[in-house]
Image: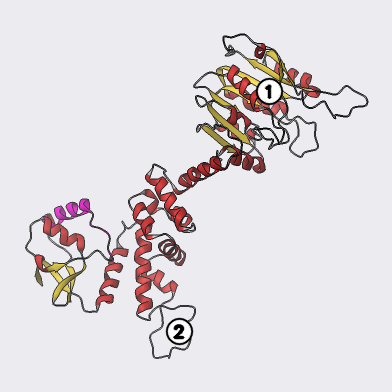
Amino acid sequence: MKIDISTINYTEATRRPINTQKVTELASSISDLGLLNAITIRRDNGAWQLVAGAHRLAACQQLGWDTIDATEFEGDKLDAELAQIDENLKRHDLTVLEQGEHLARRNDILVARGERATATMGRDRGATVAPLKTTQAIADEAGMSKRSLKNRLHIAAGIAEDVRDKLRDTDIADSTTQLIALARMEPEQQREVAAQVAAGAVSVKDAKQQLRRRELQEKSSLAIDIPNNVILHVGDMLETMPSLGKFDLLLTDPPYGVTSWEWDKLNTEAWLDAIIPHMADEYNLFWFCSPRFAADTEFIFRDRGLTIQSRIVWHRRNMALGSAAKNKFIDTWEMILHTGNRPLNFPPEWSDAWFDVQVFPVPQTNFNDSKVHPMQKPLALIARLIEFGSYPGDAIIDPFAGSGTTAAACPKDRHCTLIELQNEYADVIENRLGVLRK
């Protein structure tokens, strides 16, 4: 039958908002081919209420039509709403978020009508009563798996309505994985994530990382000014280095092979071979090592054509008192081998900072630079090596990050990459610096 378009009422209670681009495309098609499928309407208190075909109705209005082909729907208001939902679910352009909202409302209607099976109902229903719809049956009707249905219902129930509205036009709205992750959060955290997305975060994970970074920085007790250009990789440096680029400064404090810790095993040849391909054309490299193996390490450098420019002695002035030794002198220093083909960035004012003996105390728990790693190096010493070994804009890497001191000492005008094998110490870096693993 033909119906006067002006007499048809339309509400958006259970539908998506009208997509103006789709309306324009549909209007062009209807102009060429005519209206192939009539809209569906129903009587509601003497007026015509649209049941299905909102975009078709809008397209015909855009074309200036006065009347439109319509089919009258037989059923009550809930029947009509189910029909609206079912038509929308057949569309292929609903986002996962919208599917969840439609399915949740469909589920509510079935429960209100007593047609939905639940864990506490249906056992005593008589044999003459129609069987209740199970989750599997509803999934089949929606044309999806039972798991997909449950995921979408969880999304609709778990994400606050105001958060859903904020994410509706983002890529997150069509990502099941991200929406599930969001639904598992408390509403206030969801709102914080949505705010981060509005501010430029590209995913729920990215938003959570930004929130975590802010939280860690607020909790940090070290009062270190952390640059925002630090990347933390967690894994074996031998596996991670090949995927990275070139670096102007390579500063590392690898295992010394002098303790009983499981991770303190020497593999100097393999480590150096992994690092060499990632040296920039002009570079500096500082390599910490125990005096016990300093000569052996230098021979490995020489074997690879790396000339030792400096043999820097780090004097640990606070470690002599209380040390015990019977058959040798007490050691109070460690070696830093320096190789490279780039001039050092010495300050113009001459001072003993230029000397190859550097005097800094070992970090202690009562220092401002609190000790959070058993082999942690002084922040001031690492800062001096970075200052002298690099220039603004340089890329710096520490493939044995430990407590993350290299990143803590890195100026904001340089880029710092960390690699740490142990998850335990990656956690330390995150908590100390507010820098999350990549």
Q: From the viewer's perspective, is residue 334 above or below residue 427?
A: above
| Residue beneath disc 2 | 122
Q: Quadrant of residue 316?
A: top right
Residue 27 in the magenta stretch? The answer is yes
In this rendering, would 367 be left or right of 74? right
- Would residue 177 be seen by someone viewing this image from the given angle? no
* Secondary-structure class at tag 1: strand
Residue 38 position, x and y percent, is 16, 67
Q: Quadrant of residue 427?
A: top right
Q: Amino acid at mark 1?
A: Trp
At x 74% / y 24%, what residue is drawn?
289
* Secondary-structure class at tag 2: loop
Residue 318 position, x and y percent, is 77, 26
Residue 267 position, x and y percent, is 73, 30
Task: Decide which of 239, 104 is in the foreground and name it.
Answer: 104
Q: Which residues are magenta?
A: 14-31
Residue 368 position, x and y percent, is 65, 33
Q: Point out the image quarter for the C terminus.
A: top right
Rendered image coloring scheme: secondary structure
At x 55% / y 29%, what residue is drawn?
416
Q: From the viewer's perspective, is residue 308 above or below residue 77?
A: above
Residue 158 in the magenta stretch? The answer is no
Q: Amino acid at mark 2?
A: Gly
| Residue beneath disc 1 | 287
- Secondary structure mostly taken by the magenta-highlighted segment of the chain: helix
In this rendering, would 166 be left or right of 243? left
Q: Point out the image quarter for the N terminus.
A: bottom left
At x 42% / y 90%, what residue is drawn?
127
Neighbor class of circle 2 (other Cα within 10 Å; few <14, some 14-19, many 20+) is: some
In this rendering, would 417 be left or right of 122? right
Q: Which mark is residue 197?
A: none
